[in-house]
Image (spheres, rainbow, N blue to C red):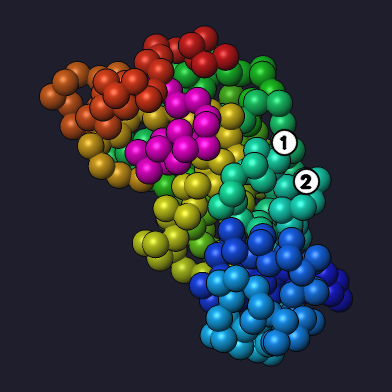
């Protein structure tokens, strides 16, 4: 068994440690294994390390769960990506809160030359899906990787259109790779494994809980060069992704809409606040 991987998974499983804190611990101790082998007395000297966290690090439970996860990923041909690995999305590595560990099932290069995330409302209009299809079709025969979240609406449209146009597409999930949510999108997910892939930071058994999706959104934004918002209401996950992209110093693009169109309220707001570039077609992004 890969002991390095077991320690990496175990660290990610430690409750409330967080990715920023985990990276600081790795730097302080000189490696992941060193964290678990460090004495409690020395760990107490590290800033912001309390007794509760130390007990979690010394618990046999996280190591046992990590061992179970290794068996799962080996059985299902899933590739773990530690944040120091070459295959880890390098754009995401530059984000302070990027996950220390990802699980990937697919066949594409996550560090390809151009990565574009496309997000939008789950209740996409017919016009919104038409625009999404048209823009993605204009990337045909390019080496552009299309990233989205496999949700209803614009997400599903993005993946489906990328597949039709021969583009690789990656779905970032808010749960483990032992399931597909929503289940109706399994037909896309199965094709994506051989034309892109599925990516998550969550271990098997993790359910698609509501709090997981903002975490998922930071991966969508962070691993991409730019984020395109096709349709968005005044509030929602696509705006969370857009503002994360802005925080990560990425380009954000938005499709304008009619002032009274609820599905365009978010896009219009981004453009009005001068934080997103107004676009009409793919040439405005390329």
> Residue farthest to the front?
45
| In the image: residue 150, left or right of residue 100 | left
Residue 87 bears which disc, if any?
Answer: 2
Looking at the image, which residue is at 55% across and 81% down?
Answer: 50
Residue of label 1: 111
Query: Of helix, strand and loop, which one carries label 1?
Result: loop
**How many callouts does the rendering have?**
2
Asked if the residues shown at circle 1 and circle 2 are in contact, with their CB atoms under 8 angstroms apart, the answer is yes
Query: Distance of mark 1 from mark 2, alpha carbons?
Result: 7 Å
The residue that appears at 50% across and 47% down in the rendered structure is: 218
Residue 180 at least partly seen: yes
Q: For residue 128, what is the image quadrant?
A: top left
Q: Earlier in the sequence, mark 1 or mark 2?
A: 2
Residue 172 spot, x, y in % from top left: 54, 49
Classify the position of the N terminus by image quarter.
Answer: bottom right
Q: Magenta residues? A: 239-255
Q: What residue occupies the far left of the structure in this picture? A: 260
């Amino acid at each position: 068994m890969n002991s390095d991987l077991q320690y990496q998974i175990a660290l990610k499983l430690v409750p409330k440690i967080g990715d920023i804190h985990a990276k600081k611990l790795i730097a302080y101790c000189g490696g992941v294994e060193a964290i678990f082998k460090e004495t409690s007395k020395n760990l107490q000297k590290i800033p912001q390390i309390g007794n509760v966290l130390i007990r979690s690090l010394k618990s046999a439970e996280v190591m046992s769960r990590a061992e179970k996860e290794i068996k799962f990923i080996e059985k299902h041909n899933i590739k773990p990506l530690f944040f120091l690995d070459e295959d880890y999305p390098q754009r995401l590595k530059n984000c302070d809160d990027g996950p220390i560990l990802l699980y990937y099932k697919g066949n594409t290069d996550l560090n390809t030359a151009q990565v574009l995330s496309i997000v939008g409302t789950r209740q996409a209009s017919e016009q919104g899906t038409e625009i999404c299809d048209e823009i993605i079709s204009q990337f045909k025969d390019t080496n552009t990787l299309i990233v989205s979240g496999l949700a209803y609406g614009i997400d599903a449209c993005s993946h489906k259109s990328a597949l039709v146009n021969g583009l690789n597409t990656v779905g970032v999930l808010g749960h483990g790779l032992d399931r597909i949510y929503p289940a109706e999108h399994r037909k896309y997910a199965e094709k994506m494994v051989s034309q892109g892939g599925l990516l998550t930071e969550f271990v098997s058994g993790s359910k698609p809980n509501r709090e997981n999706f903002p975490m998922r959104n930071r991966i969508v934004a962070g691993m991409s060069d730019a984020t395109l918002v096709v349709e968005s209401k005044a509030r929602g996950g696509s705006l969370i992704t857009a503002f994360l992209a802005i925080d990560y110093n990425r380009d954000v693009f938005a499709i304008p809409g009619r002032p009274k169109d609820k599905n365009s309220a978010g896009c219009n707001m981004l453009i009005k606040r001068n934080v997103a570039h107004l676009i009409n077609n793919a040439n405005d992004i390329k």
